[in-house]
Every structure is written in C-alpha cells, then in structure tokens.
Amino acid sequence: MKQLVKNGIRHFSTITKHKLLVGKLCFRCGLYRQGLLHDLSKYGPTEFLVGVKYYQGDRSPNEAEREDKGVTTSWLHHKGRNKHHLEYWVDYDIQNKERGMTGMKMPDNYIVEMFCDRIAASKVYQGEKYTDRSALEYFQKGKGKVMLHPYSKAKLELLLTKLADEGEDAAFAYAKRYLKAYRRYKRKKRK
C-alpha cells in the first residue's frame, strides 16, 4: 500500500510537470487555450489509476501496461480525447480502400501542440540527458511506423528539425509565425 501511495504522488508529480511544461511551451506559440487544457484526461480515474499502477519514472506507464496486458487501456482512452496525438487522426482511407486505415491531415494548431508535447515528454523523461535534438531523434526512430498524414508529418518534422538545428528560440518564433499565418488563412476561408 505504501508503494502505491508513493507511486501515486510520483505519477501525479510527473504528469503535472509535463502538463505545466507543455502549457508553457504552448503559450510561447500563442496556443493559450490548448496550453491550459492539455492532457486533462490524465487526471481522471481511467488514465490516472493505470499510471499509478505502472509508474516507473523514466518512461510512460502506458508502455509497462502494454507489456503486462498486451494493451493499454489508459492510452486508448487518452488518444481518443486529445487531438494533439496523431493517433486521434487515424481513420479509414476513403481514397484507397485497400489501404484500410491511414492518417488524416491534422489542423496546424494540433501539430504545434504535438510539437510542444514531444519536447516536454523528452525533457521530463530524459532529464539532464535532454538536448534540442532529443525530440527529433525520438520522432525519427518511429517515423516509418506511424500513420501520420504526409502534410502533418512534414510540418512536425520541420518544427523538430528547426529545434534541433537552431534551438528553442528560433523554433518557437517560427511556430508562432506559422500559427499566425494559419489563423489568417482560416479567417479568409470563412469569409
């Protein structure tokens, strides 16, 4: 029981540290609402209790649950409620029915939130080992395995590469300009 309480406190601390960091990064890009609302589902019982049970501190509890059960209920819940995850945007391909499932084009504001989320996760789990290349390297390891729309993949990779090559200030300045252009485009399209 003591270990469960310790894990609960540690898990709460880890997800809160992550959430606050994503919020700070989203604010740098002008995504205030998304920064405030990011990952709130992690605090509900479906996700939180699994996180406590499988807490390790150096990686996502979802990986441990997946290894133990062959599926992770908290991840299935999480990805279905949080639009900054590429898996939220997987659907049947109506253009190529033989392909089955494919990644749909993500709105730019969620691509930028995903960018912030990946940086924060790298910082939280890697700690002192984190560099501006960490999130790009993690993305490149799984790049061929994910169902990400070509547009979304190109935009995310551009942001991660800018971070790796030019640093945080340049990457976030670019993301902010990119979102302003996206918002202007959306306003014009509505008229």
Image: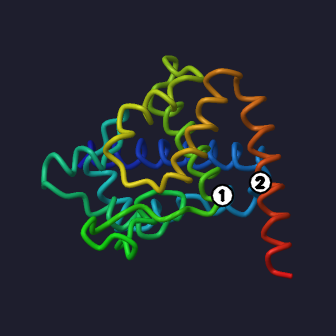
Q: Position of residue 166 (x, y in %)?
A: 71, 22
Q: Nearer the viewer, residue 175 or 33?
A: 175
Q: Quadrant of the C terminus?
A: bottom right
**What number is the disc on residue 108?**
1
Q: Position of residue 11 (x, y in %)?
A: 41, 46
Q: Residues within 10 Å of mark 1 (few under 14, many from 20)?
A: some
Q: Nearer the viewer, residue 4 or 73?
A: 73
Q: With respect to residue 146, does 187 lie above or below?
A: below
Q: Nearer the viewer, residue 155 or 1?
A: 155
Q: Amino acid at mark 1?
A: Asp
Please indicate whether residue 9 sits to the left or right of residue 31 in the image: left
Residue linked to disc 2 = 179
Q: Residue at x 37, y 49 (%)?
A: 8
Quarter-of-image position of residue 38: bottom right
Quarter-of-image position of residue 140: top left
Q: Position of residue 3 (x, y in %)?
A: 26, 42
Q: CA distance from mark 2 to mark 1?
A: 7 Å
> How are the residues colored?
rainbow
Please indicate whether residue 98 sits to the left or right of residue 19 in the image: left
Q: With respect to residue 1, does 173 lie above or below?
A: above
Please indicate whether residue 115 sits to the left or right of residue 41 in the image: right
